[in-house]
Structures are given as structure tokens and as C-alpha cells.
Amino acid sequence: MASSSGNDDDLTIPRAAINKMIKETLPNVRVANDARELVVNCCTEFIHLISSEANEICNKSEKKTISPEHVIQALESLGFGSYISEVKEVLQECKTVALKRRKASSRLENLGIPEEELLRQQQELFAKARQQQAELAQQEWLQMQQAAQQAQLAAASASASTQAGSSQDEDDDDDI
């Protein structure tokens, strides 16, 4: 089923996946590249056949999403009934793995700390952050106050110097 159009390449199983399955299934057997290509094409055609039949069954039942039951019915109607028990086992394994993955993805459950304790710790962290922020604001305010006092002292000192200098000039004028 080799075709020269670019679209067919988009609709194939990745060769690396097929090579891995071949190596796992037949570890001591060498498989020619032509045979590997044929396996890829057969897998692609099989998936297309099953998914098309499952889609028709789905449409007949007036559903919009193909479910595992539609795929199982497609296998039966296409004459692959002998695979159904194994397909059901794999489906159950997939559901189990998906459930475990969903449970494992919950960080709260992975911590082993009750949610109430986590909330208490979060509140403590917020309080500590507010305290630090208040201390920083207090320090900034004190620095501004000190700068203002220093500016006032400098201004007062400059004013005193100016007055002292002008009164000295007046004293010098009196001597003349």
C-alpha cells in the first residue's frame, strides 16, 4: 500500500515504535527492512479498517464519540472476534493504569500530609511573608525619617553658617 503522496506518511505508525515491538516480540530474530515496512503498512491498514468500522457503528448508534464498545463491535463484525477477550483485558489494564496515573498526579495525595495541615502551613507562610513585608516597610520608613532629619540638620547647619558668616561680616564692617 505504498503511495507517493505526502499525506500517507502522516497516517502511519512511527517506525521506531514498530521496531521496538518487533525487537521485544522477537529478540533473537533479524527482520529485513522490507518486512519492517510491510508490518508498518499492515498495522496502519488494520487500524484504519477497525477505526472506520467503529466510526460507522458509532454513527449508527447516534453517538459522536467512538467508545471502546464500538471498537469491540467493529472487531466482531470484521471477523476478528477471537481477539475480543484479549482486547477486553488490555482495555481493563489501560483503565487501571489511567486511574493510577490520575491518582499519582495529585500532589496533595503524594505528600501524605492532610489537607488541613497543608492549609495551616500555607497560612503560616502567608503570615510570615506579611511580617517580613511589614518589617521592610518599617525599615524603609525609618531610613526616610533619618534622611529627613539629616537633611534638616544639614539645612540648619548651613543656615547657621550663613548667619554666622553674615554676622561676622557685620562685625568686620563695624571695625572700619
Image (cartoon, rainbow, N blue to C red):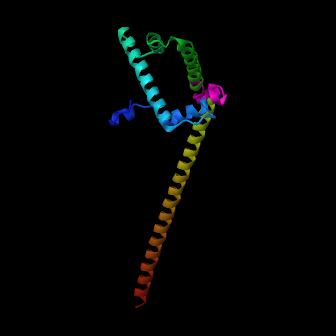
Which quarter of the rendering shows the C terminus? bottom left
Compare residues 18 and 150 and report the one nearer the observer. Answer: 18
Compare residues 126 and 10 and report the one nearer the observer. Answer: 10
Residue drawn at x 46%, y 34% is 37
Compare residues 111 and 9 and report the one nearer the observer. Answer: 9
Residue drawn at x 40%, y 15% is 53
Residue 111 is one of the magenta-drawn residues: yes
Q: Outermost residue, left direction?
A: 5
Among the 4 quarters of the image, the one containing residue 63: top left
**Residue 112 location, x and y as percent?**
67, 28
Which quarter of the rendering shows the N terminus? top left
Residue drawn at x 44%, y 79% is 165
Secondary structure that dominates the magenta span: helix
Q: Is residue 37 above or below residue 137?
A: above
Q: Outermost residue, top direction?
A: 61
Q: How many marks?
A: 0
Q: Is residue 101 above or below residue 156?
A: above
Q: Which residues are magenta?
A: 102-117
Q: Outermost residue, right direction?
A: 112
Among the 4 quarters of the image, the one containing residue 110: top right
Q: Is residue 39 above or below residue 59?
A: below
**Residue 121 location, x and y as percent?**
63, 33
**Residue 102 location, x and y as percent?**
56, 25
Residue drawn at x 60%, y 32% is 24
Compare residues 114 and 31 and report the one nearer the observer. Answer: 31
**Residue 4 location, x and y as percent?**
33, 36
Residue 151 is one of the magenta-drawn residues: no
